[in-house]
Image: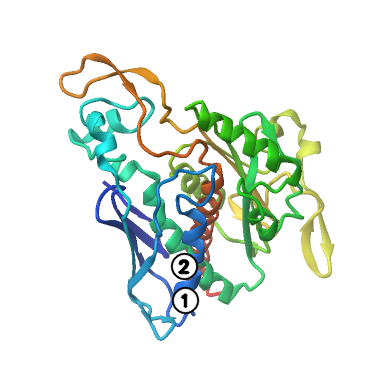
Amino acid sequence: MSSTWGQAFRITTWGESHGGGVGVVIDGCPPRVPLTFEHIQTELDRRRPGQSEITTPRKEADRAEILSGVFEGLTTGTPISIMVRNEDQRSEAYNEMATKYRPSHADYTYDAKYGFRDWRGGGRSSARETIGRVAAAAVAQQALRALYPTLEVIAWVKSVYNLTGTIDPAAVTRDLVESNIVRTADPLMVGPMTDLIKKMRSAGNSVGGVVECVVRNCPPGLGEPVFDKIDADLAKAMLSLPATKAFEIGSGFAGTLLTGLEHNDPFRMENGVVHATKNDSGGVQGGMSNGEPILFRVAFKPVATVMHEQDTVTSTPHEDTTLKGRGRHDPCVLPRAVPIVEAMTWLVLADHVLRHRGQMGK
């Protein structure tokens, strides 16, 4: 089972949702990068459960422990290991799932592949695995900002179910996104989106939606022109997240409704720098960043666990049965997905920056 991502900035996540803990080992981080526990913890706090009335009530402090690779506030260049202990597991809520597959979860596919699975909360398929990604991204963020102080990655909830915000990606700020529990960047949609998520929770149901993300002040030339295009790596990174179902960058599918003349992004010089006069390319051309904002969207499906009886089959032998969802779950993953989308973006950028500097020497 592969749990490693990246080439130059490489991470390996480990642990299960209902095991002793989860974490990450980071290899390839440059030495002498200032790194504090507080910065890592701030990012983990944005991801943790139980942070608002519209997230799972599971209570986890998600306190990070830096086990190696940092000394006197600086990275040493050796592997960085970060651990978060699980404290509020309730595995008994999953006892029935030991013999029944949950619809639209990884239960059946795990058994089909490995012939064995950890049925307590989904094991490695649980979104709790993303703790390691967020912790690693906090390290990547510090390393990149030492090189590019103005580099920004900001994600927000663009839509929940059939509610879509009106948002200008050029004007979004981190403070605006963090000012509400939905993490949308449209203040007028905070109430309707919150009410909808609460309604779904009360009905034992769930909803999905779209997270949008922008990368500002990205240097041009990151990425490769063939297989390791930066937009292809972003797509893989996002679709590796639990509950994701689609990725689009720039004009995305809407670009199919434009002609080439309408879709092309003309170039002009501005203060001695090449700039595009519009950005249907989403900041990427030929698989490489062009210096404009990188703008993409990620679709998240409704949470698969719903508190209603559904048809399923037993694990051994395979026989028809039914199963009602149990346990503590998010009625909508989007508010907690925002920092995870940002995290995977930082990891992609860190990997490509180090690869670019190694290849080009700058």
Provide the residue designation for mark 2.
40
Where disc 1 sits, the SS reads loop
User: Which residue in the structure is indicated by mark 1?
Assistant: 36
The figure's colour scheme reads rainbow
Is residue 173 found left or right of 328 in the rendered image? right
Q: Name the foreground residue: 238 vs 45.
A: 45
Q: Can residue 355 be seen here?
A: no
Pick the quarter of the image with the C terminus: bottom right
User: Would residue 180 appear left or right of 261 to someone viewing this image?
Assistant: left
User: Residue 360: image x %, image y %?
Assistant: 53, 70
Q: Position of residue 340 (x, y in %)?
A: 50, 52
Query: What secondary structure is found at the residue carrying circle 2?
Result: helix
Look at the picture and state if 56 lies above or below 163: below
Q: Position of residue 257 (x, y in %)?
A: 74, 28
Q: Which residue is located at x 33 percent, y 76 percent?
A: 78
Q: Amino acid at mark 2?
A: Ile
